[in-house]
Amino acid sequence: MEYRTLGRTGLKASEIGLGGEWFNGLTVGETAAILDAAQENGINYIDIFMPQAPTRSNLGAAMQGRREQFIIQGHLCTVFEDGQYTRTRDMEKTRRSFEDLLERLQTNYIDIGMIHYVDSEEDFQTVFEGPILAYAKELKEKGIIRHIGMSSHNPHIALRAVESGLVDVLMFSINPAYDMEAPETDIFDLMEFKGMEKDGLVVDEARQKLYSACEAAGVAITVMKPLGAGTLLKAESSPFGVAMTVPQCIQYCLDRNGVKVVIVGCHTVEEVLEAVKYYNTPASERSYSHIFSAGNAIRMTGRCMYCNHCQPCPSHIDIAAVTKFLDLAVQQDTVPETVAQHYWALSATADDCLMCGRCEPNCPFGVQIRENMKRARAVFAPSRPV
């Protein structure tokens, strides 16, 4: 494992980190096994945005006796309400959720207090001119959080945060597909990959400016969605028409200015080991130049990244899970029996969708969620249990 200084924080962070959302649904034993594998392979960085009580408690139990061995990037403004995750700017809810995070992790501090998911100008003003930032500063002054961070998918908003001088760490979505968007592309079209030029690839200058600004200011970038939720790993789903490998995706991110940690979601020990294979992969096999020479970059409509930023759902549908099973189902001529079983085991399916559209404005990737729900209804109807 190689380590990089986390910008002006001075912390030494592993180049590969763990994406905590994949701990959802695991037992204490399974969680501990993943942390064991991570620690044995030198991973010391964990992102924890999940507000689910069992997930937090299991992580806390699994981390006992080794808290100091990990750098925790814990999020403010994520809450679990009415049985589901949602983002909030309500101060009371934010405070209660963060105190719950500390209690369940059995720790008295968080290394990076990450203000969760700021993508719009209006939201930026709400956060940076209101009580949320004031609360983050209060926590930092008390030593409860050591450094302030912010997560975003919008290069313009992210740059504003960097230039404010108030943010030490930026969690940002980076992969080759995102970086090949035209700089003038609207944020929603950007995340639908509509900004890709038909007659060649164009680097998004706004994103490159952001990366360089972070490097210059000592603001560390921790990367989310480096694999594009698996989109880039298959030729049929990649906007480039060619597949990448996990090491190639990691290398691409580490090559960007400002990037210090690439956060990879790992649901099993095997996935941890797959990520750290990066260090045993020859430099020639880490090269991602083939995606730029393929010459067949195409537009790609909004694709679910399984992040659940679309929540909450009034019908309590786990939208990411429904879409994930839909994506798995349509990759084959017939729906695999195991996929159908997992789908129908969900507490709520696409059949429960009200088609209210409340979810779609929350999605940073412009996914047409209602269309996905309609498609899931049709795809899984033949396998519906009697």
Image (tube, helix red, strand yellow):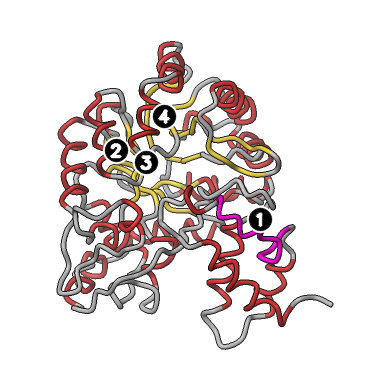
Q: CA distance from mark 4 to mark 2?
A: 19 Å
For marks 1 and 4, give the CA distance.
31 Å
CB within 8 Å, label 4 to label 3: no
Segment tinted magenta in the rendering = 348-358
Q: Which is more toward the observer, 166 or 273? A: 166
Main secondary structure of the magenta stretch = loop
Q: Amino acid at mark 2?
A: Ile
The residue lying toward the viewer, choosing from 111 and 327, is 327
What is the three-letter code of the residue carrying label 1? Answer: Ile
The crowding category of the residue bearing disc 3, from other C-alpha atoms within 10 Å (few below 14, some 14 to 19, many at least 20), is some
Residue 286 in the image: above or below residue 266: below
Disc 2 marks which residue?
Answer: 157
For residue 342, above or below residue 316? below
Amino acid type at image mark 3:
Asp
Q: Determine contact: label 4, label 2, CB under 8 Å.
A: no
Question: Which disc number belongs to residue 386?
Answer: none
Left or right for 49, reference 346? left
Question: Is residue 339 toward the left or the right of residue 3 in the image?
Answer: right
Any mark on residue 119, and which? 3
Instruction: Please state which of the two labelled residues, at mark 4 or mark 2, is closer to the viewer.
Output: 2
Q: Quadrant of residue 219?
A: top left
Mark 2 lies on a secondary structure that is helix
Q: In 3D space, how far apart are the residues under numbered discs 4 and 3 (Cα atoms)?
A: 19 Å
Q: x%, y% of residue 360? A: 50, 54
Element at label 4: strand
The quarter in which the C terminus is drawn is bottom right
Give the Cα distance between marks 2 and 3: 6 Å
Compare residues 284 and 303 and report the one nearer the observer. Answer: 303
* Residue 217 placement: quadrant: top left
Calculate the distance from the C-alpha at mark 2 to the C-alpha at mark 1: 30 Å
Residue on which the image places disc 4 = 112
